[in-house]
Amino acid sequence: MNQRLLALPLLALGFLMSASSTVFAAEVSPLKIGAVFPLTGSYASYGKGCSAGLKIALDEVNAAGGVLDNKVTLLSEDDQSDPTAGLNAAKKLIDVNKVDAILGTFASSVTLPILSYTTQIGIPVLTLSGAPEISQIGRRTHLVYRFVATEGVFGESYAIYAHQSGAKTAYVLATNNAAQLDSARHFTSRFTSLGGKVLGQTVFEPGMSSYRSELTKTLVGKPDIVLIAGYTDDAVTLTKTLYQLSPTTRVIGPLYELSDTYLRTVGPAVAEGKLATDATSAEGSPAYARVLPLYRQITGDDPTSNPYAIIDYDMVITLALAAQAAGSTDPNVFTPFIATVANGPGKTVTSYAEGLAALKAGQKIKYEGASSTIEFNESGDLKHMMFKTFLLTGGKVVVKGTVSP
Amino acid sequence: MTYLIAMGTQTGLFALLALSLNLQWGYTGLQNFGLVGFYAAGAYCYALTTTLLGWPTAAGILAAMAVGTLLAYPLGLASIRLRIGFYLAIVTLGFSETIRAVLVNEDWLTQGTRGIAVKLLFPGWGAAGNQTAMFGLILVAVIAVYLLFERVGQTPFGRTIEAIRDNEDAARSLGKPVTGFKIQVFMLGSAVTAGAGALNAIYVGYLVPDQFLSIITFYVWMAMIVGGSGSNRGVVLGCLVLVLLLEGSRFLKEVLPAALLFSDQRMAALRLMIIGLGLTVIPINWPRGLLGRKEL
Amino acid sequence: MIAFAQALANGISDGALLAMVALGITLVFGVARFPNVAHGEFLTLGAYGAYWCSSLLGWPLLAAVGGGIVLAIAAGLASYALVFRTVSQRPVTALLASIGLSILLRGAITFIAGSQQVSYDIPLWGAWDLAGLTLLPLDVLVTIASFVVILMVHLVLAKTPIGTRMRAVADNVELARTSGIDPQRINLATWSIALAVAALAGMFVAARTAISPDLGWNLLLPAFAAAVLGGLGSPYGAILAGLIIGLAQNIATLWISETYKVSFSFLILIAVLLIRPSGITGRKEMAR
């Protein structure tokens, strides 16, 4: 008798509670982010660091209270360095996990098929890929944001730095993918316009066990400097042999290739004298200072080995701030805000908490990231930026100066 | 829902490949390890004819099938010369790798690693509409090819090629033009494979040579074995199992208790280990596959 | 002219390594009667084994090399016992299982070691200039070592009782059995030798380049081309074919693009097979 009487009010209470939580939940669904990047396959060596960068950012956002008072979830999928697997991974994240954005895509060959899908359904993609085709898609759809300089701009930076270092003749070794080939193209035209001479170009397949024939061709004309447009793994193989064949020939490449990891793998003798450039120019930023120890703690590495990890961090923060600023986790609403919070004008903020506070106070913000001053043009590419130049010497990567391609 | 349709489409694409392979291996005993080369050739032919030349979809698919048939001719010739099965396997493997190398290097034609965008099937229909239409198209293709190959299996042609598989010398001594049959089987199978490539191009929407690595050929072999080589119904089922294995393993991290969750990279490696384990154990313990008629 | 001589020198280096890998593949084929797609993974394991022994455990060079060989043999024999022995009568099944195994092993290596590249800590000497020809001491060392290994295998096969029995089993298992040879023991011996050679090949490749989970897999295609070119099952064919392909690839790049290197090895293979369908040594496989 007592139980029946109790049941009714309890039921009513339960109903009221679930109804109210539904009402509150209906206002804003939590932000869900999908990350698609290589954890296995040819580009996998960058994967571990990227995971760490994403985690650091996610923790920071949720520690500050999340987006629109909801915790943010981030789901990662391996693209296996393969376009079809990457596309299926993106589809799974979008259709099954209902993510509101995709970020972290790495290889252009994976990003482009994903874009052919995401642009149909209005999901924004924040990418690390360097191929020029992506800019065209960005200009057309405003659904792609590239958080790296295009490889073409990298190519120009090598040309300027090489010229500055006194090299008159150069040879180009490029790995066989769209981004690096574009980089090589831009290097060649810029270097030539600066008065230098490019003796030739050889495209190489990554992952081979011997590059003697490629290097023999490279050294025929005794170039002052060799551009290696590629990634750390092949740079290790190529430069070790190159060093034995001709220790005085200089080498230039991107910092993500001739990185700390590269230095540690080949040793100070081989690494001595190598030139590198990098578009990330925010080592002095408060954001970077905050992320650095956390990254070291998780991976045991230095972020200069993997600037992509820091860029991934910025992607998450920017996305979170965009949704917060837009007051919505619907991609149709918040996507334009990605450029808004990155470009400003507004109060300069360097952390999610700072940005959140400013937005809640009704202010406009301009996020300055740990990887660079992020500002987008109408193609979703980063606006013209400075490049830092580096010299690998005495077992260290040393900053030399800046160039402006 | 769209993910399921996408997975259905992926299964259908594999099924077309597996049916072709079944015709070549299951029925005729030819070890074709160069499937992905024809898949790639068909895809690129479709993309180039429809994008560069502006041909309509149907013409593009037919062009792809024609290219597949033409490219199969040298392999057909090779299969006659190479009586030792594994030799044909290696040669066909090298053939498909060469096709990929050409796709990468002759970028004046193929755009190389820059890739080619492929138009939507029905540009006005939006994403969901196109996905569904694509699935419908592939379903029709699979049914058509299935019926065709079932029919072929029942004709004298079909009986002859099975005789070639079981005892080539006997077939030859009975006066059967073994040479001609082998070439025809290669060409017919490759026409279907290349046609599937064209459909794949529409499905993915953007082509790069890296999509066509030899691992895909290996996956299709596995699907065929799982389903049971020799049985067309079986190989289609095998493709379903394959896609479940490849895509289902993504959900591993959502199912494992949090304590067992490793780092992202380790989880990805674990997923590959599970796929590898499945692909090792299945051919051993289920040699006849699910619906197969003949022991391997 | 100098360019041609340089291509020859480079070709001998590359060819010797290829010969070692092809030799391992063909030895296994001789007794197991199927091409082992997972063979590359044993190269990788050998390379990693030596690396872990020297870097993590601090063992000296020879001990580390031994460690790498032991790891490869252990993994290989385990694969044989758990996987390949059960399908010894079904070659195509074994081939397919070996494909699955290669994916499994590469996943396992990535799981344990991560996908970041590592390198041996060996000194790099400057190149020697011999009348315009550039030779790398490290390459020369590796090439000589490769030939030593090949010679040792030859001596075992030709001069030792067990080698004779290995050749007998590879040639005709039934006949060997009736001669009182225990095929099982010989299988183990052959596998072990093939795995040891694979491990060493892996270490040599790693010494010239670096160590990563895909080390062996990347070499597989040209190695298979060489094994088939030489006639599957024929050790001397594999050695010769490896050298031929190494030389041909390097000479060809004087005219064609580097990126066609692997395709070129297949072109050679097809050309030769058209004339001699059983490979260079013309070893005829029994009709199945």
Image: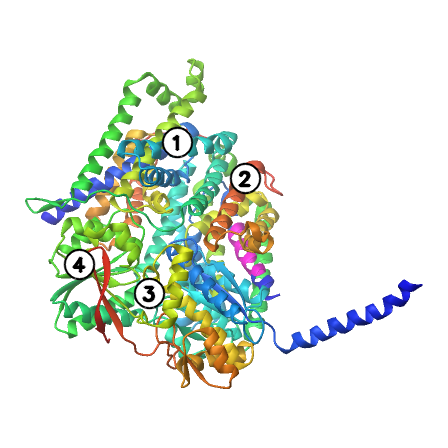
Task: Please give the range of residues in magenta.
Answer: B7-19
* Residue A170 numbered mark, or none: none
Q: CA distance from mark 3 to mark 4?
A: 28 Å
- Mark nearest the camera among 3 and 4 is 4
| Helix, strand or loop at mark 4 | loop
Estimate how packed mark 3 is, as few (under 14), some (14 to 19) or many (20 or more) residues with alpha carbons within 10 Å. Answer: many
Residue B21 placement (x, y as % from top left): 50, 48
Sequence order check, earlier mark of 3 and 4: 3
Residue B59 placement (x, y as % from top left): 47, 68
* Residue A178 numbered mark, or none: 3
Estimate how packed mark 2 is, as few (under 14), some (14 to 19) or many (20 or more) residues with alpha carbons within 10 Å. Answer: some
- Name the chain under label 1: C
As displayed, is residue B3 above or below residue B32? below
From the image, tell me which residue sits under label 2. B281
Q: CA distance from mark 3 to mark 1?
A: 41 Å
- Name the chain under label 4: A
* B218 sits left or right of C133 in the view: right
From the image, tell me which residue sits under label 1. C73
Q: CA distance from mark 3 to mark 2?
A: 38 Å
Instruction: Determine contact: label 2, label 4, CB under 8 Å.
Output: no
